[in-house]
Image (tube, rainbow, N blue to C red):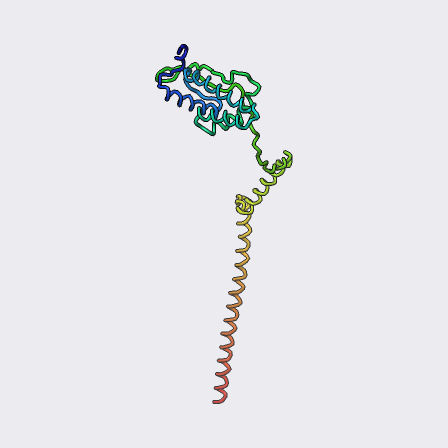
Amino acid sequence: MRHRKHNHQLGVKSAHRVSLVANLSCSLIEHGRIKTTLAKARALRPAVEKLITLAKKAHGSEDSARKMHYRRLAIARLRNKKAVTKLFDELVSQFVARKGGYTRIYKLALPRLGDAADMALIEFVEEAPKKKSKKKKAPSKAKEPKQSIVEKDASETEAKKVDDATETPPAETSETASNSKEADKPKKKAKSPAKKTDTKAEKASTSGEDSSEEISKEDSADDSSAQK
């Protein structure tokens, strides 16, 4: 009799349904939680829980042949070796002490756009213990006290002010300009008497030369008259 065999048909043929459930199972094992329609989530739950039961049997048995047998059965259903190795090596440890009910379904309030299908989240009940990744610690710089930081900032601002002062000369104010003009005026006046003295000396030298020439002419005239 095929009584109660019409559950979770999903409106597709058997080959399509088997591959669909296998793909959903691989996604759930890889990510730990997936979002899908409510009908698919309900079809996925018994398939995944049967696979977890196989992993628990392999984990509890000491015979290596039995372990390989259970692993091959899971590979035949999932068709993905990576998902099987993750389930049998990592995820099985969190379900060893649990006797059933390995998954949980949450109904979502908003339906899917387009066909208004009911949506749901399906996830594992217990999260797998995450391995701590060893990160290389960078050499931490010693924290400086706040006072030293403030002193550094003040010294930097003072150094900048000194550099600006050396690069740009200070602008002349009106008082400094007037003082410089007054200082230049007596220098010009002091130059004028020197020029006058130079002109007087030149004139005296020229007049002395003229007088000496006249005296020499007169002497020469007296000599010529005496010879006559």
Name of the residue lying farthest toward the bottom: 228
Q: Is residue 71 above or below residue 178?
A: above
Name the spot of residue 117 as percent of width and height, x first: 38, 15
Front residue (pair 228, 14): 14
Name the spot of residue 127 as percent of width and height, x first: 54, 22
- Name the residue located 56 percent from the left edge and 32 percent from the top edge: 133
Q: In the rendered view of the protein, which quadrant contains the N terminus?
A: top left
Front residue (pair 148, 166): 148
Front residue (pair 140, 197): 140
Tag count in the figure?
A: 0
Q: Quadrant of residue 145?
A: top right
Name the spot of residue 18 as percent of width and height, x first: 40, 21
Q: Is residue 4 above or below residue 219?
A: above
The answer to whether residue 109 is left or right of residue 115 is: right
Name the spot of residue 114 as percent of width and height, x first: 35, 17
Front residue (pair 91, 120): 91
Q: Is residue 180 above or below residue 116?
A: below
The answer to whether residue 27 is left or right of residue 131 is: left
- Name the residue located 54 percent from the left edge and 55 percent from the top edge: 187
- Name the residue located 50 percent from the left edge and 84 percent from the top edge: 222
